[in-house]
Image: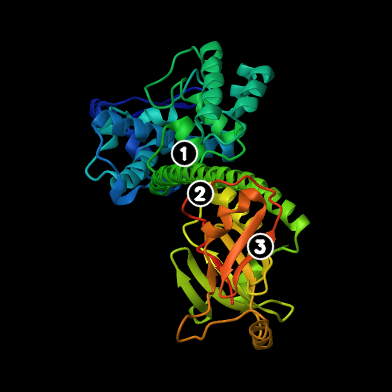
């Protein structure tokens, strides 16, 4: 290329045709080469978002199979949870534009562990740049708070600063967030990733809730993430335990009510029986006590008689009859007595029993065994009891009786009468005198009757006779 010098000796370069052609070719090559792609710009920039926090929500093999739209909703919820954690740490809602490709790549690697062969961007229609583009050009916490205002933020904090695992607190929080979005975030959003509808939840998880975005309750409420295996298993376990507990409690209540009713029914039966027996015992007792007041009869307790006869031992039986058994025994004072225990007793025959005790107690004769006392009692185990006590004469007393002036037949010819029939006693009771037949003839005795006499009786309490010697 030639040069020309002109005053004041300036050099001018005149382009030649060849150099002009080379320059034009160079410009053409530069203009035709494509600009660097976004992926080429992001190749060397690491993603600042921490997607590893989502691994705690991995349900493992129990993850249900979902349709594509539902999978995309979970992918979007997980991204917003990660953005909330990023906002909490840096004060920025979005990663820088030159980190978009690396962030999608990091999220794709994690999503492949959850859902193999699922391409996030291709399946859900997400463009690469949308991850770093948001709502109304709001990128920082300060811009968001300046737009919303303190009063609205305070309302959000009041409703969301609690555990959101239960339905009622979650509903209160999401209602306040919906009101915030409808009032302030009505502008344009770029794409469908970081939209205006997601900003309130991202902010609330980062700053309004004390448990943070990684909390299970917060993730379930604000980002609809409910894939936690432990949470689902725990929920099923709680439901199962609740059902079992309710069933057991119901059985316990039914069993308790039945037990109490059964006990009450038994108590009322015993009470009615006791009241009835007490009424009978009271009437019989008053009659017998009137006899005891005019005679030397003693009313013994059933326990005393049971102890004296060794609980009515078979070894103590000294006589049997249609009326019952006669037992020998020793009282507490050392005296030997005979106990006449009647069987098949009921309250219906107590009046006759009282009459017969009065008759026998009024009789006195040298050959008659003296009546010591009586016992009437009702116990749960043995029922209604009637017992009379006779004194057992010693051998000396028997010898003395035999040495009296009354003649006694020899034993081979006629045994000594030991029983005077109660009919013989009752035959003369109305006249106030009594004649007893013995080997020495008839003897007349006078007694006072305190009870009306029923000649028929009840067949239960009638004595077979009065013991004699």
Mark 2 Cα within 10 Å, few/some/many (few <14, many 20+)?
Answer: some
Front in this rendered view, residue 218 or 18 = 218
C-alpha separation, residue under disc 2 versus residue under disc 1: 103 Å
In this rendering, which labeled residue sits more in front, label 1 or label 3? 3
Q: Quadrant of the C terminus?
A: bottom right
Residue that badge 2 annotates = 457
- Name the residue rendered at 35%, 35% in the picture: 75
Of pointers 1 and 3, the one earlier in the residue sequence: 1
Horizontal relation, residue 69 to residue 158: left or right: left
Of pointers 3 and 2, the one earlier in the residue sequence: 3
Numbered disc 2: secondary structure: loop
In this rendering, which labeled residue sits more in front, label 2 or label 1? 2
Residue that badge 3 annotates = 444
Q: Which mark is residue 408?
A: none
- Name the residue rendered at 34%, 30% in the picture: 73
Numbered disc 3: secondary structure: strand
Numbered disc 1: secondary structure: helix
Q: Is residue 141 above or below residue 443?
A: above
Residue that badge 1 annotates = 82
In this rendering, which labeled residue sits more in front, label 3 or label 2? 3
C-alpha separation, residue under disc 3 versus residue under disc 2: 25 Å
Front in this rendered view, residue 375 or 238 = 375
C-alpha separation, residue under disc 1 versus residue under disc 3: 123 Å
């Amino acid at each position: 290329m030639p040069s020309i010098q002109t005053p004041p000796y300036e050099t001018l370069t005149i382009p030649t045709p060849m150099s002009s052609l080379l320059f034009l070719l160079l410009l053409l090559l530069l203009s035709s080469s494509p600009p660097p792609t976004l992926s080429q710009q992001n190749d060397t920039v690491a993603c600042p978002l921490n997607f590893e926090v989502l691994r705690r929500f991995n349900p493992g093999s129990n993850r249900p199979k979902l349709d594509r739209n539902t999978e995309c909703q979970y992918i979007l919820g997980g991204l917003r949870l990660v953005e909330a954690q990023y906002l909490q740490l840096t004060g920025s809602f979005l990663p820088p534009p030159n980190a978009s490709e690396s962030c999608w790549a990091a999220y794709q690697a994690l999503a492949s562990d959850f859902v193999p062969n699922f391409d996030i961007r291709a399946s859900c229609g997400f463009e690469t740049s949308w991850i770093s583009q948001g709502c109304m050009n709001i990128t920082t916490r300060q811009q968001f708070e300046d737009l919303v205002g303190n009063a609205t933020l305070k309302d959000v904090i009041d409703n969301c600063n609690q555990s959101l695992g239960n339905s009622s607190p979650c509903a209160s929080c999401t209602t306040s967030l919906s009101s915030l979005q409808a009032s302030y975030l009505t502008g344009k959003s770029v794409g469908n990733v970081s939209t205006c509808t997601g900003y309130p939840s991202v902010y609330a998880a980062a700053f309004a809730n004390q448990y943070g975005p990684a909390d299970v309750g917060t993730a379930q409420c604000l980002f609809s993430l409910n894939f936690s295996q432990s949470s689902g298993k725990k929920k099923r376990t709680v439901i199962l335990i609740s059902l079992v507990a309710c069933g057991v409690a119901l059985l316990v209540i039914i069993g308790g009510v039945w037990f109490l009713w059964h006990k009450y029914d038994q108590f009322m039966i015993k009470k009615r029986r006791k009241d009835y027996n007490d009424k009978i015992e009271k009437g019989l007792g008053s009659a017998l006590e009137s006899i005891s007041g005019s005679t030397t009869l003693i009313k013994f307790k059933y326990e005393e008689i049971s102890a004296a006869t060794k609980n009515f031992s078979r070894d103590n039986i000294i006589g049997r009859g249609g009326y019952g058994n006669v037992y020998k025994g020793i009282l507490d004072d050392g005296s030997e007595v005979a106990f006449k225990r009647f069987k098949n007793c009921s309250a219906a025959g107590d009046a006759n029993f009282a009459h017969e005790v009065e008759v026998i107690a009024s009789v006195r004769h040298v050959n008659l065994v003296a009546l010591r006392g009586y016992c009437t009692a009702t116990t749960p185990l043995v029922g209604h009891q009637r017992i009379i006590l006779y004194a057992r004469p010693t051998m000396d007393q028997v010898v003395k009786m035999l040495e009296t002036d009354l003649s006694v037949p020899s034993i081979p010819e006629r045994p000594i009468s030991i029983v005077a029939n109660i009919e013989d006693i009752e035959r003369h009771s109305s006249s106030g005198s009594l004649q007893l037949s013995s080997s020495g003839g008839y003897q007349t005795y006078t007694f006072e009757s305190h009870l009306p006499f029923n000649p028929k009786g009840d067949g239960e309490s009638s004595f077979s006779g009065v013991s004699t010697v």
